[in-house]
Image (tube, rainbow, N blue to C red):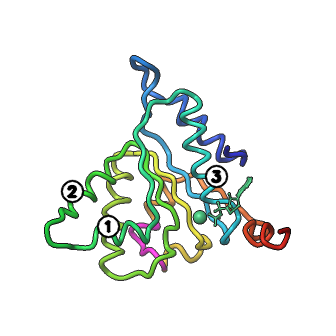
Amino acid sequence: MADRPKVTAWADQIAHAGRPGPGGPGIAKGPSLLIAGPTGTGKTYQAYGAIRALLARGVRLRWEATTTADLHARLRPRVGHDAERDLRSLARCPLLLLDDLGAAKASEWTEELTYRLINHRYEHMLPTLITTNLPTDQLRSALGDRVASRLAEMTDRVVLDGTDRRRRTASAA
Ligand SMILES: Nc1ncnc2c1ncn2[C@@H]1O[C@H](COP(=O)(O)OP(=O)(O)O)[C@@H](O)[C@H]1O
Ligand SMILES: [Mg+2]
């Protein structure tokens, strides 16, 4: 479960803003959360923890999660596959986890894809969990101005530090 105060505070805020409905509140519009930090510091763990915290509070929501690398693979143009439809579905999903933003190799195509995804979520204030290895001062050069400035406006930020938890486990074994 998410245990970082800023992560639980985000989940509380989203849960409180929930639209009342039959069978419990539905997820509402609201701020997004950017979880930054080096590899192995628990970013993915906290992000899934935030989703579980919302579900534990009884918020009804549809969510999707993807790493940026998988997103690129999934949306690459292929015969017989409607990538636009896939992008639309991710862009509109009430809660989206975008894991490891900025970790995959960038190109003009990936930058445009990220822009369209983030821009839709920005304009509609759809809660988005984003994790990244990139330090804040490298977000702009890695993701482009348009994405970085939208992220700056739409996200609360939490920076995780510490040592790589995976190495710690390996050396303890
Ligand atoms: N708060 C925590 N309590 C217990 N295990 C954790 C915690 N945070 C992370 N881990 C474990 O440490 C490892 C690295 O975490 P992960 O979230 O994958 O890091 P990152 O996404 O930053 O690379 C995983 O095996 C994860 O389950
Ligand atoms: Mg991770």
Which residues are the magenta region? 142-148
Relative to 57, 166 lies left or right: right
Q: Residue furthest top?
A: 22
Q: Is residue 169 above or below residue 3?
A: below
Mark pair 1, 2: CA separation = 11 Å
Q: What residue does disc 1 label? A: 74
Within 10 Å of the Cα at label 3, are there few (<14), some (14-19), or many (20+) other Cα atoms? many
Of residues 34 and 141, the one nearer the viewer is 34
Mark pair 3, 2: CA separation = 29 Å
Relative to 131, 19 lies left or right: left
Question: What is the secondary structure assignment of the residue under circle 1?
Answer: helix
Q: Residue 85's mark?
A: 2
Q: Residue 153: where, in percent of width, then height? A: 48, 56
Q: Amino acid at mark 3?
A: Gln
Q: Amino acid at mark 1?
A: Arg
Q: Quadrant of residue 20?
A: top left
Q: Residue 63: where, in percent of width, then height? A: 42, 44
Q: Residue furthest front?
A: 173
Number of callouts: 3
Q: Residue furthest left?
A: 80
Within 10 Å of the Cα at label 2, are there few (<14), some (14-19), or many (20+) other Cα atoms? few
Relative to 150, 78 lies left or right: left
Question: What is the secondary structure assignment of the residue under circle 3?
Answer: helix
**Nearest to viewer (mark 1 / mark 3):** 1
Queried on whether the Cβ of the residue with tag 3 lies below 8 angstroms from ligand 1, the answer reads yes
State the predominant SS element of the stretch in magenta. Answer: helix
Q: Are marks 3 and 2 in contact (CB under 8 Å)?
A: no
Q: Amino acid at mark 2?
A: Arg
Q: What residue does disc 3 label? A: 46
Closer to the N terminus: mark 3 or mark 2? 3
Q: Quadrant of residue 44?
A: bottom right
